[in-house]
Image (cartoon, rainbow, N blue to C red):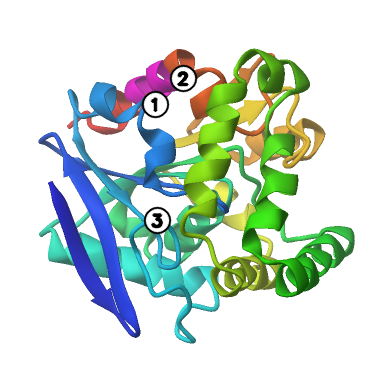
Amino acid sequence: MNRSIPYPGGLMHYRVEGEGRPLILLHGFGESGTIWKEQIPLLAQVCRVIVPDLPGSGSSLPAKSASLETMDAYAALLGALLEAEGHTSCTIIGHSMGGYIALAFAALYPNRLDGFGLFHATALADSEQRKALRSKGIRFMQEHGAADFLKEVIPGLYTDTFRVSSADIVHEHITDTCSWATPEALSGYYSAMMSRPDRTRVLADFNRPVLMVLGALDKTVDLNETLPQTNLLQYGHVHILESVAHMGMREDPERSGEILKAFILGTNKP
């Protein structure tokens, strides 16, 4: 079932499947909600799955709104979605940038979360080196467009082996994203990521289940950076996907689905 809610400047569209307690699946940068397509049917067996296209991604256009310049603003939009669906609480799983939004939601509305998950995401703020790379990316997009930028960036999210063995999946990711991406939307995401604060305190203070899924070969969110954060968790569920880089839901879809389903079943216990 496809639905939408307004935000200043446009509509955020989302998909709903299944029944029960709500799970919001958030995509990352250079993706839409379709990135979770392998896991949605499995998860819809045990909960109500809500999968937004964040403003500027997929079907949620126009691409840029001055009101969406921080992760907190995206978190507030999720709060509005939750209210529109008649729910007082939910579980949120966020991939990469979606994980940063999940952390913002946990900081703003901790009592509205049954649990949350970081799927290839970190609670640390951007380093100065990372900010410089994002600024360089923004300049590239302004000069050459979103498509040329994505064709350079997306393949690096997968392992070298996967890019060869599953070239069709990588190509699909690139083609799908290039069909809707604009420099304005992608630059807005980068700016929001650059300005986000360190949220390791959120991990330490949250007193309900937290899932962290890490890629052993992730070059975007390095395992050596994220693994120490797992020690902060009060009720942690930690999984390292071997032979996976930054795209576990595509590189190891069955294992990713199993991990998410087990976590949801745990947070849904009365």
Callout 1: 10 Å neighbours few (<14), some, many (20+)?
Answer: some
- Amino acid residing under circle 1: Leu
Dominant SS type (magenta): helix
Q: CA distance from mark 3 to mark 1?
A: 23 Å
Which residue is pictured at 63% across the width and 29% down the height? 214
- Above or below, comparing residue 45 to residue 134 in the picture: above
Residue visible at 26% across and 54% down in the picture: 14
In front of the other: label 2 or label 1?
2
Residue 126, percent from left and from top: 76, 60
Q: Residue 105 in the image: x percent, y percent?
A: 43, 61
State the residue position of label 2. Answer: 253
N-terminal label among 2 and 1: 2
Q: Residue 259: say if magenta.
A: yes
Residue 209: x %, y % from top left:
42, 36
Q: Which residues are magenta?
A: 256-262
Count neighbours of disc 3 (C-alpha within 10 A) and say few if under 14, some if 14 to 19, many if 20 or more. many
What secondary structure is marked by label 3?
A: loop
**Mark-to-mark CA distance, 2 and 1:** 11 Å
The residue that mark 1 highlights is 260
User: Left or right of 157: which side holds 18?
Assistant: left
Of mark 3 and mark 1, the one earlier in the sequence is: 3
Residue at left offset 69%, top offset 23%: 163
Secondary structure at numbered mark 2: helix
- Lower position in the chain sequence, tag 2 or tag 3: 3
Q: Residues within 10 Å of mark 2 (few under 14, many from 20)?
A: some
Residue 75 image offset from top left, x and y in percent: 41, 66
Q: Which residue is mark 3?
A: 58
Q: Amino acid at mark 2?
A: Pro
Q: Which dot, 2 or 3, sits closer to the camera? A: 3
